[in-house]
Image (cartoon, rainbow, N blue to C red):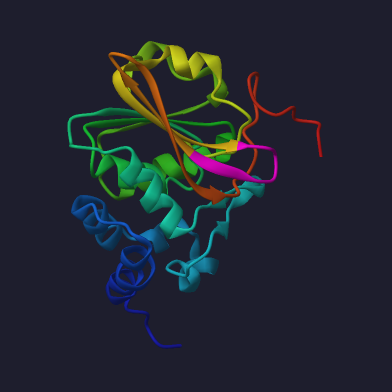
Amino acid sequence: MATMDYKELRKAMVRDQLIPRGITDPRVLRAMEEIPRHLFTGPQLEQHAYDDSPLPTADGQTISQPYMVAIMTELLELQGNEKVLEIGTGSGYQAAILASLAREVYTIERFEDLAKNAAERFRMLAYTNIHVKTGDGTLGWPEGAPFNRIIITAGSREVPPPLMEQFGPEGILVAPLGDRFSQRLVRLRKTRDGMETTFHTPCVFVPLMGAFGWPENRK
């Protein structure tokens, strides 16, 4: 089997999947081109790492489609000095993108094995600004609050109230909101005059579980 040129595949991903769909932030595009997504997929899926689609991970979770990672990151408008809270670590790929663009990333995963595997990837790739814990993401990370940015990588009917409380002044929160099987990306921006809400692309994420999420026993 021929050796895959992952660097060229990342360039093609940016050129063919992201730029034509309107991703314009040069820092986001550079991060997507540089960070090795294939190291987050597991060996059996490495050959599909730069496909235009989500990929399965353990515990019924997914690593999001590259475009979805890019647009959610772009909507956060990261400048480099932010403290970011991510709900749903999964494989760790989104957190790695965030960590290359922000000062610190706090990421919560409800499955212990996923959290441990992601933390090991971060160590292997020498990320020192990512903090990982296992827990109920709908409760947030109170001891780390307030956060300049919050990103939720699972679908919910609404933003869990604890996350709204941990959302700092002039902050931005991005989340897929809707019903259990269909959502739309929503960006909330805190301003001096209140909360500004904008709606973006339709999407489908795994459900957000927890005290303020979907019930575990619902099919």
* Closer to us: 40 or 8: 8
Residue 119 x %, y %? 41, 39
List the single residue furthest toward the bottom: 1
Q: Residue at x 23, y 52 (%)?
A: 25
Where in the figure is residue 160, as x and y percent of width and height? 56, 20
> Where residue 44 sits in the image (x, y, percent)?
55, 68
Q: Is residue 67 visible?
A: yes
**Quarter the C terminus occupies:** top right
Which residue appears farthest toward the front when viewing the image? 193
**Nearer to us in this view, 171 or 64:** 171
Q: Quadrant of residue 207?
A: top right
At 45% across and 66% down in the image, what residue appears?
49
- How many numbered marks appear? 0
Q: Give the residues drawn in magenta, as a range.
A: 178-185
Please indicate whether residue 111 sits to the left or right of residue 106 in the image: right
- Please identify the quarter of the rendering in which residue 154 is found: top right
The reply to whether the magenta stretch includes residue 41 is: no
Camera-side residue of 127 and 150: 150
In this rendering, is residue 62 above or below 216?
below
- Please say if 9 is above or below 216: below
Q: Position of residue 168 (x, y in %)?
A: 32, 16
